[in-house]
């Protein structure tokens, strides 16, 4: 099935493409045929999920392969809790699919609009110093490589560390096997606290909780902290009442906030006032609910984002440097900074490869120009040993990235093996991989 001529745009409106054609395969065999046809015509082909990356990683100039029909549970082993999903399965559907089997994903990010394949391929992560990014939950994949053949990479294959976070550069993922865990609940404590105190005690907070993160609205001295503790599924739930959830997450966090961003764009002097108001009306609640209802939050206000991964011990000084930068430049920033943490892992292109990691994410409303802000923040992150999130905005090229990833050239060798003709490349991958 093809739909030629349509314009594709990503969620953040930072990238778009008008591919030669779009295809919507529903089987591995259909993926093989699409890859083989593109190879014969010397067209580049890109698999595309929800378009929630801010970088150009999913831009398809020739053939756009929409994998949304490859969805749902393909196989489940109750003895090992390993579950195979179609690669196009949206993350927000996974909890419902797993719940009937008493299972859950070990960790999630705060947005669940991505497909499984897109999330693992770009290095999506949540928070929790003992828990890796989503790609660390992958114990097997089925992938169609550049010769149009299907290849299974299992848990014992050393190439899984490359393919499970492959940037879409190695082929088209058909299905993904995740190591799941028994379903669990999270006790959530969200509260405003003095920013200086939070930064000064950051290491203790991170090490002392299962999951910890905080948000900071520039122009305030308050951190909105989120601390989550894992509990058995048998623990009685104390969910947020529906009306309260609607007011907090739909009306205030998205509806009113959208208006604040729009006004702040036209009248920047009001941004500090709005930011102080935001810290007073949000981020103060306790509840206990199913894990996915605590990990994830709705995000409907469009924004642009840059996120850098730092050695965990560098997060506090890097954060303070960004805080000082915003003050010195007298910028009016309406979106909060987000600070999260993750365990080190063995995935070759993981931003947390071989080190305990903290993340600092900066955002701007999508109708504002983020260039000056992001450029200056990027300089701070690089000075503190940062690695950019693959799915978010950054300026680095292959030479700069090679110095930050010990297995970078090993990954390029796998690219040559899986896709010697560069069928799955695009302008973004050309820049960051340099082949």
Image: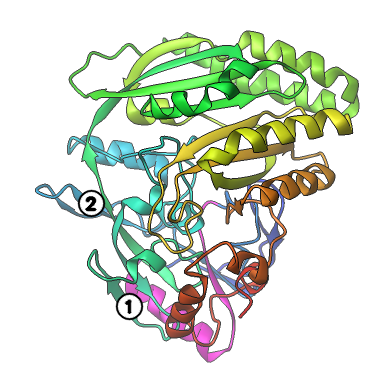
8 vs 103: above or below: below
Judge by depth and name the residue closer to the eye, 377 or 112: 377
Label 2, label 1: how many angstroms apart (C-alpha)?
A: 19 Å
Locate residue 219: give its quadrant: top right
- Return the x and y of residue 207 as percentages of the image width and height: 40, 29
Question: What scheme was used to colour the molecule?
Answer: rainbow
- Magenta segment: does it hold 126? no
At label 2, counting other C-alpha atoms closer than 10 Å, the crowd grade (few under 14, some 14-19, many 20 or more) is many
Instruction: Magenta stretch: give its range.
Output: 27-50
CB contact under 8 Å: marks 2 and 1: no
User: Residue sitting at 37 percent across and 59 percent down?
Assistant: 70
- Return the x and y of residue 27 as percentages of the image width and height: 34, 68
Quadrant that contains the C terminus: bottom right
Judge by depth and name the residue closer to the eye, 235 or 396: 396
The numbered dot on residue 83 is 2
The numbered dot on residue 150 is 1
Residue 251 visible in rendering: no
Residue 7 visible in rendering: yes
Of labels 2 and 1, earlier in sequence is 2
The local secondary structure at tag 1 comes to: strand
- Return the x and y of residue 147 as percentages of the image width and height: 42, 86
- In this picture, residue 341 sits left or right of residue 158: right
The local secondary structure at tag 2 comes to: strand
User: Residue sitting at 81 percent across and 18 percent down?
Assistant: 272
- Return the x and y of residue 30 as percentages of the image width and height: 38, 74
276 vs 51: above or below: above
- In this picture, residue 155 sits left or right of residue 17: left
How many marks the image carries: the answer is 2
């Amino acid at each position: 099935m093809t739909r030629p001529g349509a314009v594709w745009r990503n969620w953040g409106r930072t990238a778009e493409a008008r591919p030669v054609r779009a295809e919507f395969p529903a089987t591995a065999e259909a993926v093989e045929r699409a890859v083989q046809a593109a190879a014969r015509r010397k067209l580049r082909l890109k698999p595309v999920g929800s378009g929630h990356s801010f970088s150009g990683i999913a831009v398809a100039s020739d053939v756009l392969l929409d994998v949304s029909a490859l969805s749902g549970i393909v196989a489940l082993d109750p003895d090992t809790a390993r579950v195979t999903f179609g690669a196009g399965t949206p993350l927000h559907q996974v909890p419902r699919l797993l719940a009937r089997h008493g299972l859950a994903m070990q960790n999630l990010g705060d947005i669940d609009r991505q497909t499984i394949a897109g999330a693992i391929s770009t290095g999506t992560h949540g928070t929790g110093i003992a828990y890796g990014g989503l790609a660390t939950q992958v114990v097997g994949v089925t992938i169609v490589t550049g010769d149009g053949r299907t290849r299974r990479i299992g848990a014992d294959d050393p190439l899984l560390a490359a393919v499970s976070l492959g940037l879409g550069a190695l082929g088209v993922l058909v299905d993904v096997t995740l190591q799941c865990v028994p379903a669990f609940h999270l006790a959530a404590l969200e509260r405003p606290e003095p920013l200086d105190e939070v930064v000064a005690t950051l290491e203790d907070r991170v090490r002392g909780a299962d999951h910890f993160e905080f948000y900071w609205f520039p122009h305030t001295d308050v951190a909105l902290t989120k601390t989550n503790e894992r509990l058995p599924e048998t623990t009685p739930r104390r969910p947020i009442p529906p009306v309260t959830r609607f007011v907090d997450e739909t009306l205030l966090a998205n509806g009113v906030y959208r208006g604040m961003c729009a006004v702040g764009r036209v009248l920047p002097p009001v941004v500090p006032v709005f930011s102080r108001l935001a810290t007073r009306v949000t981020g103060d609640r306790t509840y206990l609910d199913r894990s996915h209802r605590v990990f994830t939050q709705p995000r409907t206000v469009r924004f642009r984002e840059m996120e850098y991964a730092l050695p965990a011990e560098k997060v506090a000084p890097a954060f303070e440097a960004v805080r000082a930068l915003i003050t010195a430049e007298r910028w009016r920033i309406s979106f909060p900074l987000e600070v999260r943490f993750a365990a080190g892992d063995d995935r070759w292109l993981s931003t947390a490869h071989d080190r305990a990691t903290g993340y600092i994410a900066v955002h701007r409303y999508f109708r504002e120009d983020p260039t000056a802000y992001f450029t200056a923040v990027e300089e701070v992150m690089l000075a503190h040993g940062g690695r950019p999130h693959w799915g978010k905005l950054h300026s680095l090229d292959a030479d700069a990235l090679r110095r930050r990833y010990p297995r970078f050239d090993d990954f390029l060798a796998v690219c040559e093996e899986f896709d010697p003709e560069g069928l799955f490349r695009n302008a973004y991958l050309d820049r960051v991989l340099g082949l």
